[in-house]
Amino acid sequence: MLQSQLFTKTRKEAPSDEVSKNAQLLIRAGFVHKEMAGVYTYLPLGLRVLKNIEKIIKEEMDAIGGQELQLTALQDKAIWEKTDRWSDDVLDVWFKTKLQGGTEVGLATTHEEPLTRLMQNYISSYKDLPFGAYQIQTKFRNELRAKSGIMRGREFLMKDLYSFCKDEKEQEEYYEKVAQSYEKIFNRIGLGDITYKTFASGGSFSKYSHEFQTLTEAGEDTIYIDEKKKIAVNKEVLNDEVLVDIGLKKDSLVEKKSVEVGNIFTLGTRFSEPLGLMYKDSQGKENSVVMGSYGIGLGRVMGVVAEVLSDDAGLVWSAETAPFQVHIVTIGDHQDVLKQAQDLKESLENEGLSVLWDDRDTGPGEKFADSDLIGIPLRVVLSAKTMESGTIEIKKRTEEKPSHITENEAFNGRVKELLGEM
Amino acid sequence: MLQSQLFTKTRKEAPSDEVSKNAQLLIRAGFVHKEMAGVYTYLPLGLRVLKNIEKIIKEEMDAIGGQELQLTALQDKAIWEKTDRWSDDVLDVWFKTKLQGGTEVGLATTHEEPLTRLMQNYISSYKDLPFGAYQIQTKFRNELRAKSGIMRGREFLMKDLYSFCKDEKEQEEYYEKVAQSYEKIFNRIGLGDITYKTFASGGSFSKYSHEFQTLTEAGEDTIYIDEKKKIAVNKEVLNDEVLVDIGLKKDSLVEKKSVEVGNIFTLGTRFSEPLGLMYKDSQGKENSVVMGSYGIGLGRVMGVVAEVLSDDAGLVWSAETAPFQVHIVTIGDHQDVLKQAQDLKESLENEGLSVLWDDRDTGPGEKFADSDLIGIPLRVVLSAKTMESGTIEIKKRTEEKPSHITENEAFNGRVKELLGEM
C-alpha cells in the first residue's frame, strides 16, 4: 500500500485524557481511535494487526479441530436466569436494554448459556462427543473503570472456545490440548518468552484453572513465577498447601506484575446441569455433558504487545502481527528511485510479503520517525545514494543501526529471509 | 472436512415459530440457530457462507480503494444529538443502555456520526480527498417486527462504506464507481440476474438514491422493472415526472415484489456540516466535506440467496458462496471406496477446492436428501459400483440427473472445470 493514500496520519501527541501507554502509542500511530473510555475504533493499520492476531488464533483453533460459529450479542434473559447469572449482583458487568415490546435483553459478556442451550439440538449420544466449538465475536462488559486502553475494553473482540466431553478424563485431555495450542499462539504473537501458564482459582468443578499471564508493570495482576520451570501461580491462590500440590518451592519464586492474556477453565456440569444438556452413554444412561471454556481477548493481546514490546521511539510488531511486514521508505523524488521502489514493492508482494511504501512528499527525518512509531519489523531505505552504490539500506525495527544488502539480494529473497529470522 | 465430525445435523422440521422460508431452510440444514426473533447464531456451515460473502464484498471494496476499519457498537449520545438523530422519534430502531455511572449510550444502527467525527483528525486539506472507508460490522436495530428470518435482523452484519469528497462532482464519480462495484458483487454472489439497480428517494441532498433490489415474492418492497434496460423504480417515488426524468416508459414496466440487498446514497453535507468536518481548498477556503454512504447487509444477502435460489429439496449455493464446493458422498464402507474418497478429497483440496465428505454410517437415501438440503454445488458419489466401472458419479445441485466422468478425469482437474462453468 502507498502511505500517501492511507487516510490516517501519525500525531505528535495522544489525547490528554488517554492515560494508558498502549492506547497513547496506538492513537499517535493511527492504529486506533478512542470513542469513549474502553471503547475504541480500529483504524486500517490497527485492524490489520487485529486480523493478523485473529488469523493466528483461528489457525491454531482449527488445528485442534475447533469448529467455528458465531453467537449473538443480544441475550435472552430466560436462560441466564436458569443458571442464576442474570442478576447484576451476580454478574456485575451486564449491559441491559429492551426490545420495543418492553422485553428485557442483555448484551453478552460471555456465551456459556446460549451455547449450552443450542447444543441440546445437536448432542444426544456419547457418539457426538467430544468436540470443541469456538467463535471470534464482540463481547460487551460494563466495566466501572476502563483506564487500560485496549487492554480492558467495554466492547472488545474475544475468541472463546468451549469443549463438550463425556467425562472428566476426556475433559482433562481436551484441556491439555488447548493449553498447548495457547503456547503456540502466544509464541507466534511474539509474547511467548514473557507469558506464563499460571495456576489460578478453579471454581467449583476443578481444583485449578490456568491463566496465561504476560509480564508487564502495567498489569493488574500479581503472580509468582518460577523462571526455570516457566510456570507461575496467581497471588490469589498462593499458599503453602498449593505450593506442595503443584511442586513449586517458595524460594525459587519471584513476584511480578502481569496481565492475563488468556485463560482455560474446566466448567464441569455447571451449565449443562441447569440447562439440561445431556447425552446417553453406551449403556443408554443419561449423563450431563462435561464442559470447558477457553478465552483469549484479541484487543487485549494487541494492547499487551503495544505495551510491552514497544520502545521510546514507538510500536514494535512481530513478523506475524505487523500491519505490514516491510516498510519501504524513499528519500527524495528521483524517478529512478521511485521506479526501483515500485519494482521492489511488487517483487516482495510476489514473494507473499505485505509492504507499505512511504511515498509521501516529506523529509527523511519525519519519515524515519513515523516508521519507528508505526513499528513495521523491517525498514528498507531507497535513495539516490543507495542506488548509486547498487545496495539498499535495511534495518530491523529492533536494531539501532542499519546494514546494507545488494540490490540483487533484495530482489531475490534476502528480505524474506531476514523476516524469517525475527 | 468429514461430515461425521461436524457437530450440526440436519433436521426434518424447522421450529414451529419460524415463519420465513429462508430461516426454515437454514435451520433445518444446520446453518443458523434462532436465539430470538430477528437474532440468529451462525453455525459452522452458515458462518462459512457468511465469510464467503464477506470475502467477495471485501475484495470488491479493496478493488476500488476502500480502506477497512472497524467502528464500535457503543455510541456516544453527544454526537447523535448534534445531528438530531438521538431521539427515538427520529431514529425509531435504537437500542439504548447505560454505563455503570448512569451515562446513556446507544447501540449503533448506522455509523455516519462517529465516522464523521473521527475524520476530523485526518481530513484538513483538499489533498486528503477523495477516499473511501468501509467496515464489516454488527449493527443493532430494534425492529418492531422481525418475521423475515435472517433477511431482517435485530442484530446483523453489515458492510458500510462511506466516501469523503471535495464537491458534488467528485462525489458523483465515486458514487458511480461504487454502483459498478455493487453489480460485480451481486453477480459473484449469484443474484445478478434478478437484482435491479432501482431509483429511490434521495433525501435532502440529491434527487435520487439507488437501491439494489432482488426479485422475490418474500420481499417487503414493490418496484417497477424494465427488464430490457435492467433498471427499476421503487413504487415509493414512481410518478410521471420521475419517469420522464429517468427515461423510462410506463408501458414497459412490470410490478414486482423485491427485497433491498444494497443501497447507495449521496449524503452531501448532512453530517459534515453539523459535526464540523471541513477541509481547506487550494485557495485556502474552508468547505464542508461532501459524503456518500453505501450499504450491504451480509445476513440479508445470505437470506435472499436461501430464499430465492432454493428449491423443494433444499438450499442452492453458488460456487463462490457455498460452505463447501464439492460434496463427496460415499455409499457403503468398502475400504477401497473409502481410500478413493480420501485420495479424491486431498486431490481436490490441493487444487484449491473446499470439500465436505459425507463419511457417516448412514444409508444413501438419507445422505442424498441431506446433500440436497445443504445445497453444495457439486455432488460426487463414490461406491463399489462406480469403482468397478472406473468412473465417479457427479451431479450439479441444480440438475436433476447425475452424469459420470472417469476416475482419471476426476483426479485431473475436471471437477474444478465443472465448478467453473457454474
Image (cartoon, coloured by chain):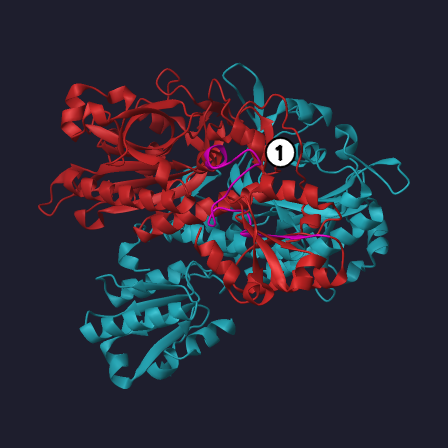
Chain colours: A cyan, B red
Q: Which residue is mark 1?
A: B28
Q: Quadrant of residue B256?
A: top left
**Going 73% across and 67% down the picture, which residue do you hit?**
A228
Most extreme residue toward the left is: B283
Taking depth in this image into account, of A183 and A56 the one nearest to the observer is: A56
Asked if B216 appears above or below B402 in the picture, the reply is above
Is B325 contained in the magenta span?
yes
Asked if B380 appears above or below A331 in the picture, the reply is above
Q: Position of residue A366 (x, y in %)?
A: 28, 62
Is B66 contained in the magenta span?
no
Asked whether, in this view, residue A304 is left or right of residue A340, the answer is right
Taking depth in this image into account, of B126 and A171 the one nearest to the observer is: A171
**Going 45% across and 73% down the picture, which residue do you hit?**
A416
Q: For the residue labelled by badge 1, is the local secondary structure a helix, a strand or a loop?
A: helix
**Going 29% across and 71% down the picture, which residue do you hit?**
A341
* Magenta: main secondary structure: loop
Question: Within 10 angstroms of label 1, few (less than 14), some, or many (20 or more) residues?
Answer: many
Magenta segment, which residues?
B305-331
Q: Position of residue A392 (x, y in %)?
A: 33, 78
